[in-house]
Image: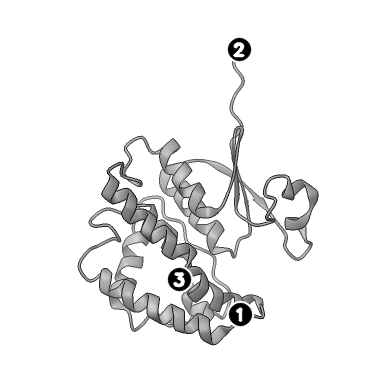
Amino acid sequence: MGTEKSPVRLYRHLLSGHCHRVELFLSLLGVPYHPVEVDFALGEHKAPEFLALNPFGQIPVLVDGDVVLADSNAILIYLALTHDPSRRWYPADPKSMASIQRWLSVAAGQLAYGPAAARLVTVFKLPLDGDRATAIAGQLFALLDAELDARSFLLGDEATIADVALYSYTRRAPEGGIALKPYPHIRAWLSRIEALPGFVPMPEVPGKSVE
């Protein structure tokens, strides 16, 4: 008899946008998984057993059989290549792959240092430069709103992992004091993502989501 493969495990924190983008994609793909909560207040991300999974001490971490993978964007690519045979979410043509990489770089760059950082200041009280984060967010959202004027999703008519990578911290930008009201095309794009089969929302921080 063969051995049954263990379910996918996702080490996460509920209020992390990096974790939510992976959870969102797992749900969009219909991939069942077992969430494992990592308590930052207790320092569980620095415990030896967690550092054995990710020496950087960061979440999320995905465990899929023998595969242990950190970094949310890397996990999105892995899931797209292993659980989406249609390649809808990560098209195989060079132009699409390069365009997606562009947006994954934005997710790790301007999105992380803008809306995500502003949220870290207001929600988690991290000693970051809130004014700089707000300025970066404004520049990013102006560009993103202009790009979405001409198409439904970041690459065209179909959602890809690029949209998944940018969704969570954009939707929760108001928790960092970044209003979405000035960006109608972004708000319409968020609504289109939220209408996708399998969509799951990111938990709100009470009292912080003000458009």
Query: Which mark is in front, 3 or 1?
Result: 3
Please state the horizontal and vertical placement of residue 62, each as a whole percent of the image.
59, 45
Q: Earlier in the sequence, mark 1 or mark 2?
A: 2
The residue that appears at 33% across and 52% down in the rendered structure is: 98
Judged from the image, the secondary structure of the residue bearing numbered disc 1 is: helix
Number of marks in the rendered image: 3
Please state the horizontal and vertical placement of residue 86, each as a whole percent of the image.
32, 37
State the residue position of label 3.
110
Residue reaching furthest to the top? 1
Q: Earlier in the sequence, mark 2 or mark 3?
A: 2
State the residue position of label 2.
1
9 versus 170 height, above or below: above
Decide: few, some or many residues near mark 1? Use Cα within 10 Å; few <14, some 14-19, many ≥20.
some
Q: Amino acid at mark 2?
A: Met
Q: Earlier in the sequence, mark 3 or mark 1?
A: 3
State the residue position of label 1.
121
Report whether 149 appears left or right of 179: left
Judged from the image, the secondary structure of the residue bearing numbered disc 3 is: helix
Decide: few, some or many residues near mark 2? Use Cα within 10 Å; few <14, some 14-19, many ≥20.
few
Residue 9 seen: yes
208 versus 189 height, above or below: below
The residue that appears at 48% across and 53% down in the rendered structure is: 73
